[in-house]
Structures are given as structure tokens and as C-alpha cells.
Amino acid sequence: MSPHPRPAPDALAALHRTLTRTVRGTVDFSPGARALTTMDASNYRRVPLGVVAPYDSDDIAATLAACREHGVPLVPRGGGTSIAGQATGTGIVLDLTRHMNQLLDLDPGTRTARVQPGLVLDTLRAAAAPHGLTFGPDPSTHARCTLGGMIGNNSCGAHSVAWGTTADNTETLDVLAADGTPHHLTRGWDTRPPTGPDHTPPESARTPPESARSARTPPGPAGPAETPPVPDALRSLVDTHLALLRTAYPTLPRRISGYALDALLPEHGTDLARAWCGSEGTLGVLTEARVRLVEAPPARALAVLGYADESEAAEAAAGLLSFSPLTVEGMAADLVPDSTSLPRGGAWLFAETGGADRAEAAHHARLLAGAAGALDARVVTDPAAQRALWRVREDAAGTATRGPDGAEAWPGWEDVAVPPARLGPYLREFRALLAGHGLHGTPYGHFGEGCVHARIDFDLLSAPGIAVFRRFSEELAHLVVAHGGSLSGEHGDGQARAELLPVMYGPELTALFAQVKAVWDPDDLLNPGILVRPAKLDENLRFAVLPREPVDVAFGYPQDGGDFSAAVRRCVGVAKCREPGGTHGTSVMCPSFRATGAEEHSTRGRARLLHEMLAGEVVTGGWRAPEVRDALDLCLSCKGCRSDCPVGVDMATYKAEFLHHHYAGRLRPASHYALGRLPAWLRAAAPLARPLNAVARLRPLTSLALRLAGLTPERPLPALATRPLRPGEEGAPPPGTRPLLLWPDTFGRHLAPHIPRAARRVLADAGLHATTPPSWLSGAGVCCGLTYVSTGQLDAARRVMRRTLDAVDGMTAAGGTTAAGGSPSAGTGTTPSPASASTPVLVLEPSCAAALRTDLPELLPDDPRAARLAARVRTFAQVLEEEAAPGWEPPRIAASAVGQTHCHQHAVLGDAAERRLRARAGLTGELSGGCCGLAGNFGFERGHYATSVACAEDQLLPAVRAAGADTVVLADGYSCRTQLSHLGPRPGRHLAEVLADALPARTL
């Protein structure tokens, strides 16, 4: 590996000045920008000097010139989802996603598209879909990976059995060599860039916004005007090594490792573009590509085939290729949290077929299933059901990072490929090798092409564990080669496997790789340490910088053994949180990234900053680090990542933890006092509701109050209830009703008491009596502590929670509760049955229910009462489903519904019971995913209004605007209803209200 020592401070400052003067795009050497790009989705970490986001190829040329002048390496980066470490570097990281992300042209006639390197794959696919076309390669990261990254790694995906690799679908590439010389790569040795209108980018792609145009010195010419020497030198190398190139490469569909120099053979058409694919940013920087599109089948069906184990599934896969399937994917039971929707078996093949219509696709799938030799089979034709099954497969890269026992598992041998006919024997020997080293892994992947993914529970934290990692890697490389395979079948070699390329290719061909690298990049500026003169596979491990002793924290982190470092390590970088805005079904994560598109506002970005905060090398302020505080400032604490992140990163909890330490012993923002202590303020204000509401209508006074409280002036203050929830108002229980405890959440008690009153009417109709013990409403009463948690006031939250547990525990220990000072709540017979420690606790506000279910036991892990109360928490629909009188049915409404499932309910409680209740009531239609954007205190705080509105515009507001006049707008959360009242064309209502209004008059 050629050394590039870190420049001295004055040289680094000179580099920054040069880039700032010559680059029109973004130049950022701040600790935050560097911290965000130290890692990709691999085990590796390299700290860059700075990040440049170019606007165009001139900016890239200027950056290359500055790097040459100062002897600083450069690494191109797309979505940062590379699994082998090739998207990290020690010099300048070139972020091609920020500005160079345009679809320049799509020609349905020629079935081609011209793209910039930062274009996200799904954006291209969405543009091609109206023409019946698609881009064939589709990695599981298709919603966030970029075309430039796919070309750099020669990515494949599930449909490669039908449509091949990215190299198979690439027509031409425009690249800049390390000296800034432009090359147009296609078939033949002439690499001179073409000219003409077809190669002029649209104005939106070439011209930066006015704010980016300044008096900066424009970049100089990209390179010499004469024909560059690269083609001649490459041709000479090929002519000299014809025999080697014809014999040294294994023949298999997923051979991705090393440079594809055999594509330069005359019998292969001297395909320079194909040879450049998979070079992992080591030969040049891609500026533009023309890619081929394929015709997408109008209809698809999925044959799901069950086998005893993955070896049997693997041996069957090759035999299915004669049916011309679109995919043949394999997956074992270890990766399937719930296999009830799958055929019998311990492993499955997903074989997709196409057709002119659903019937034809299903016919092909049934023919394939009949010949598959499976234990059991199922043909799925419903598109929604197919998507649900594919989500299980696509999330495997994340779910595989935790074993069934919670042990961490890591990439490194993520995509080995062997000839498909050898896959079954290979998997058996792979399992044996794992066992021999005391390791565990879960194979899955593209079985139809012999490509296997596996996350393995390497111990990458200790020296003995790292030694096992090395020994296993070396032995596995020899095993793969013995089966005629490739060390990489999809994601490239990077740092994970490049050191072992001589095992696969031998010393002569790997030496030729170095000569080719020298032709393109003689000074080793481009992604050094990757492919040629590689870093060792056990160097630069990203875990080495983390503290070895447990970090003192407030939450219990039960899924991570109480270790905050382990919680932060959950983020492996697959970046599902970076999926762009729009329609995402019921997904919530990550609303702030969808609003801003900035890495620091994604769950991954925040996890990376926390990682670097713990490391203390780039982010040096510890818990006081402003870079972390600023990134977390736009986190809505929606908890969406807790359920939507494949590895269960819980950024809402991490944010609360950070704020707790960040403000320890010092003054907090005013909004923390105003909104974090909202329950206390509302209790104090309740007797003065009418005059306070009148004062709130006086705009000058309200503006002053909002400014002093740190709140945004764009929002009105919510009106206080003039008749708040009071003890005993539910009255005595009618005979024969079952007891139920109704939680008096702050919002329902003081701001929207009509919600619990409506719920009581519905519950009474279902034979239930909802009682709120007087002790829960008197004085400070009970509180879930949510507002204290979300503002990081965790000491206060624990005090509130312990007081709440005392009240709840004291009530049940006393043998029951009374309603309105009368007799205990009645049971199902004539004898009253008191509330007990097993009586369900109905919480109507989803955010409060989620806090009781998760925050309470995780903040008080040493108090068994917390877990007991959490287990009793139920939502409105859950109570009706579990406790209603036999035969009870909700009132029929028979209308369509729109709205939003509360993000905390989605993440913590689930909405299956709510869906069933809506269906029983005749409410049709799907509720939106995403987050309303108000999110408790977030949307009221100063500086958050624009982001709050953008989050609402992602899914919620468009759905409500498009709804018919008779459509019911549902929003069970107070924040969701408030956001709709501020921004929406129509208000939202709690499901309890809607059902109560539909009850017969006798129950009102």
C-alpha cells in the first residue's frame, strides 16, 4: 500500500484553500463532515481529511488537481453502502450524491439512459417504469444505492440470472483519470470524449444554484489536449499477456473480484467500459454513464419452495434455471422471524417468473414449482404479498447482523460466488469450516448464480478474535478457489478480500493488476489500499477505536447487554434510513432525512457521529460535542428506526441519552423547560383554563410568550380544556361489565378530554367499564414521563416514573379501585370484581403507551414493577379485541379512511389490532406511513417548523388532500391531530371518536 501521510496543519490549510477557491460545489473539512464518512457498510474505518461534493466534472477535475498538487488521496463515494470498505478513505472523500445525482436522458427507443454517478437506482427505475422498462441489476439496497457505486462495484442483485451484472448493462462510461484527463470508455481503444448535443448535460445538472456561484477561481483545463497515453499503455499490457488473460479467470456468472481485464481481449470486443466496471474507484472517477434498460415483464409471480436445509435448496437451484426464471434466491430459517406465511421447510427458494399477465406468470411459476423437488411449495401472485416476502429477503443484510441469541455478526465474507452446480457441496464445507473455528453464520443469497451472503459472528473486539477472523478468511479463500469460485460475487473486494486475491488469481495476474493501476493512476492517489497493494484484511477495523469499558448511561439497553457502545455498533451502514421521500407504505424511518436529504439527518449519519463521539478522534467533545447535538436536533424521536431499521437502531433513545449527558449540570434550551415539563404546567394551568385561553388569543402577548419559551411563532398555542378529565366522572359500573383501567394521559386529561369520554362510550357498548382511579388524577397523579424523556431530562423522568409506579402498585395492592367514591368496579357477574395487577391498562395516546411499554422498563430496569406495568399496557383496539363481551361488534361506518398510524405505535405497539377493528367497522383504505412532523415537542420548537412541515408533506398531507369529502380522517395521536389542524385541509379524529359517533343513541 503506497503511503500517503497526513499533511501537516499548514499543508492541510493550503489544500482547503485550494479546494475552496477552485470547486463550486461543497467543500467541508469540519469534524462532523469527516465523521459522517469514516465508514461505509463494512467492518472498516478510515478517517478522511475532508469531504467535497462536486457539482460537475469540472469540480471533479479541480479536486483531482488539488489532490495531485498536495499528494492527498481521493475516494469516490456514492450511497456509502459498500460492504467491503472501498467507500472509505484517508484523504478527500468525493460525495457524488449531493449534486451529481441527475437522470440526464432516458431514451425508450434505444432502451438506454444517461445518468450521473450519484443517481439513486430506484429513481432511474421509476422513470423507466412508465415505458415498461427497468434497469436489470437490483441490489437489496436499490432504494438508496447509486449508479456510480453499482458501476464501481459491478453490483448485481436478485435478477442477475435474467439480466446479468451492472457491467452487462453498461454501454459507455465517461471518466476522469487521476491526472484529470477525460476518457470515454466503450468498445475499442479510442477513449477520446465525444462531442455534440447528446453529451451536454441539462441546465439543471450543469449549473449550480445562485448561492453556490461566487467569485471563486474557475478550475483550469481538465487535462492535456492531445490523445492520452492510457489506451496505448493498456493495449500494450493486454497484447503482452494474452495467454494469461485467457486462462487465469474462472468461468462463472458472478465473478466480480479483481479487474476484469479479460474484457479487453479482442474476442470479447475490447470492451473498455466493461473492464472498468468493478474497479472500485481505483482507476478513475466516473462522471457520467450510459446504461442499458431491459423490458420489465408486465406481470410477475413468485414460487416459494421449501426444502429441509439450505444445502438441499442450493442443490435444487441450478436445476431451475432451464425455466428461465427472473430470480432464484435462497434463504434459511435463521433469517425468517415468522415463517407462517411460507411453505414447510427449513430453507426456501424464491423463484420469480414473468408473463404478459398474472395468469401467464402464475403458469410459469407452477411449472417451475412442479419440477423443483421441494418439500412444499406456494405460488404467490398478489403483488402486495410478493412485496412483503421480498422485504424479508431485502432486510436480510441487516437482520443477519444479529444471531438468534443476540450475538453480533459482521460482513467480510458477504458475497462469495461458486459455480451454481457446486453451491450445495460448498455450503456443507462452509458450515463445517465455521464450526471448526467456533463461528456461526447464516447463508442466504442468489442461489441461482451460486452467490452466497453470510454475516458471521466474528469477535472483532479482541486480539484473539481478530486472529480467528484472519485464519478463517485465509482458509475460506482457499475453499472458494477449490470450488472454482470468486472471492467476491457482488460487492467487490475492497479491504475485506483484496489481500487474498493472489489465492484466486496467482501472483502473475495480481502483478498485472498493479501495472494497470499504474497506467491510470501512477501516483496511487485513487482509493489506495484497495485492490492493488491492499491494506490487510484485519487492519483499520472500525471497532478498535471504541471504548472497552462500559459507558455510564441512564437507559438499560437490554438488547445490548447494557452497553451503549454495543447499541451504537448496531448500525452497520446498510442505510435503509436513506430511502428518499415519497410513498413508502407503512414505513416511518427516517422522516428528517426524507425532509432534508442530508446524511447527518439520517439514522445512519447520527449513529456514525455517536460512534465517532465514543472514539474521540474526530469528534472530540464527548457528550458535549456540538456536531452530535446539531445532528440530533432534527431527530423527531419518532422511534421509526426502532422497528424499520433492519438492525433495530433506536435513535430516539440514543438522542434522549445524549441530551441527558449534554446538558448535565448546565442550562438547557428554554423549550426543554416549557415542553419537557408540560404535564406540570398543564396541571397548574387547569384551574385558569378560560382566562389563559383568552390571553392566548392576544397575538402580541402570545408571540412574546412563545419567544421566551423557545417555541416557534408559526404555531398557535393549543387551547386548554375548560372541562378536563376529573376523578369519578365515569360513574358507577353497570352490572355485568368487566373492569378496565383507563390511563389519564396528559393530552387526554388537559387538552383533549373528549377522546377518553368517547372511548368510554364505545367501551361501555362493548361491556367494559373504564375506570380511572382518583389517586391517578389527584395531585401530580400518574404520568408516563414521555415529555421528560424526549427532552433528555432523564433524572426527572425516573422520578416521575417511580412516583407513577408507587401509585399504580399501591392501587392494585390495596385490592382495587373505586369509581366516583362508590363500589369497586363490577366483574362479569353480579359480584363486583376489583382491579388487580393483571387488569389491562388502556392508554389512548399512542406516544404515552409506547413510553410505558419501552421507556419505563428501560429507564428503570432494576424495578420489577416497571416491567409488570409495561406488560399491562394496551391500545384501544387491543382492549376491544381482547376484553369485549362475546359477540360484540363495533358500529358499522362503511366509509373509506385516510390518515396516519402514529409513529410510536408503528414502532413499538404495532397496529394489527387497529387494522382489524377498522375492517370490522367497515372502514376501508390504508393509513399513511411516515411521521406527521409535529412529533410532540419537536414541531413546536424554534427552528424546526420548516422540517416539521416537510415531514407532513411527505405522506400525510398529500393523502388527506386527495381524500374525498366523505372519507374519515384518522389520527389517534394528539400531535398528528394538532399538525392536521395547523396544516391540513381537514382535522383528524381518534378512532374512538369515530366509533362513538356511530353508536346507537341508547349508548350515548
Image (spheres, grey):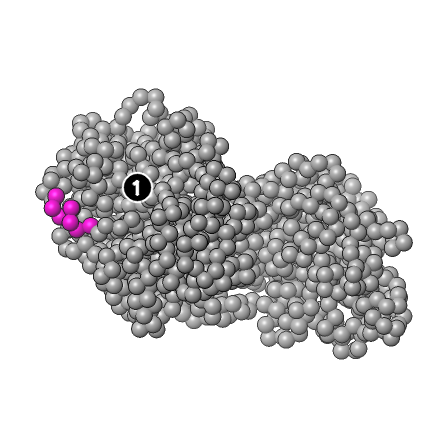
Q: Position of residue 554 (x, y in %)?
A: 56, 67
Q: Is residue 702 visible?
A: no
Q: Is residue 389 visible?
A: yes
Q: Residue 530 vs residue 932: left or right?
A: left
Q: Position of residue 235 (x, y in %)?
A: 14, 37
Q: Residue furthest left?
A: 240
User: Who's the residue at 48% across and 41% down the image?
Assistant: 360
Q: Position of residue 731 (x, y in %)?
A: 88, 63
Q: Position of residue 135 (x, y in %)?
A: 40, 39
- Predominant secondary structure in magenta? helix
Q: Residue 500 vs residue 416: left or right?
A: left
Q: How many marks?
A: 1
Q: Which residues are magenta?
A: 242-249
Location of residue 908 (image quadrant): bottom right
User: Who's the residue at 60% across and 75% down the image?
Assistant: 862
In the rendered structure, does residue 465 fall within the stretch colored magenta?
A: no
